[in-house]
Amino acid sequence: MKIVLNGETKEVAATNLADLLSEEGISGRVATAVNESFVPSSLRAGHTLTEGDRVEILAPMQGG
Amino acid sequence: MRRFYDTDLATPLMLGTAQYPSPAILDRAFRESGASVATVSLRREGAGGAGQSFWSMIRELGVRVLPNTAGCHTVKEAVTTAHMAREVFDTPWIKLELIGHTDSLQPDVFQLVEAARILTEDGFQVFPYTTEDLIVGERLLSAGCEVLMPWGAPIGSGRGLANEYALRAMRAEFPDTPLVVDAGIGLPSHAARAMELGFDAVLLNTAVARAGDPVAMARAMALAVQAGQLAHQADPIEPRDMAEASTPVIGKAFLT
């Protein structure tokens, strides 16, 4: 299935958000949003991905 | 001393974490500055997990973290970013930035008030990056904000307090509200001036991070906010137009 992950179109095997993070090798402190809506970490496993979803995975970064 | 929501700050300096020449210099500058708050942001996580090492470093500084919504232009974007930041950084604090103008990065105060209301109702403790407008300040307080952060000058401009008169008016209008000059500070004298006016803290980043020697500038800022704060507490004299001799006239010898 093709999704848009952090702005880039990508073919992924994962069917839910938690599996997507595992597939991408992302762990630690991140926050997720799908189609511009926040998805809390507790709801990731239950959040089914569908073709064309826009997924954002954000991490701590320098800021002013 | 005024409290920032339920928190007393050990020093009146909030320091940004962006634009330093290296992580090591950021770390040294922070320790030298004595800052009690570090501003941070959220960005897309890369494959290398750069965000995780940054987070470890910030945690070791042992300061309060104030995540921002930098770069957000709409209420929805800012509110979503705030929720993501709350989960990642595990804090209800949010520096609410809603940018309205590309060149000046002036806040869009109309959307700012709306977003502040939504976030306050969601349990956030909002630190709004605003202008020096008194009516906007009132609306932000009505929306639930308990801190106001007017700009000194545009972000990164280093121009200091562009409208000191308005900042002074703001201090007088909101005597019980913690006020922070956020943005525009270029020199320690600017930071000291904000504190002399009775502001409760100064938030800066570029002035330190982009200085030739960020560690030395961090120290200079630490001294400046301390000097300004002490001066305000010491009740300074009013300026006057004509001289007033400081040495007593009585007892002066007649030698002409």
Image (cartoon, rainbow, N blue to C red):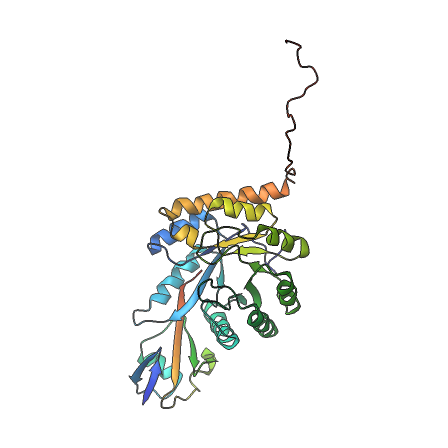
Task: Tell me if residue B175 can be seen.
Answer: no
Question: For the point 34% across and 86% down, which residue is it?
Answer: A3
Front residue of B154/B202: it is B154
Q: Quadrant of residue B110?
A: bottom right
| Left or right of residue B20, residue B166 in this image | right
Front residue of B232/B124: it is B232
Percent x, y of residue B59: 43, 60
Q: Quadrant of the C terminus of chain B?
A: top right
Percent x, y of residue B180: 56, 55
Q: Quadrant of residue B157?
A: bottom left
Question: For the point 39% across and 65% down, which residue is it?
Answer: A61
Task: Tell me if residue B46 can be seen.
Answer: yes
Residue B101 higher or lower than B190, as above or below = below
Percent x, y of residue B250: 70, 17
Residue B186 higher or lower than B84, as above or below = above
Most distant residue in the top direction: B255
Q: How many marks?
A: 0
Percent x, y of residue B145: 61, 65
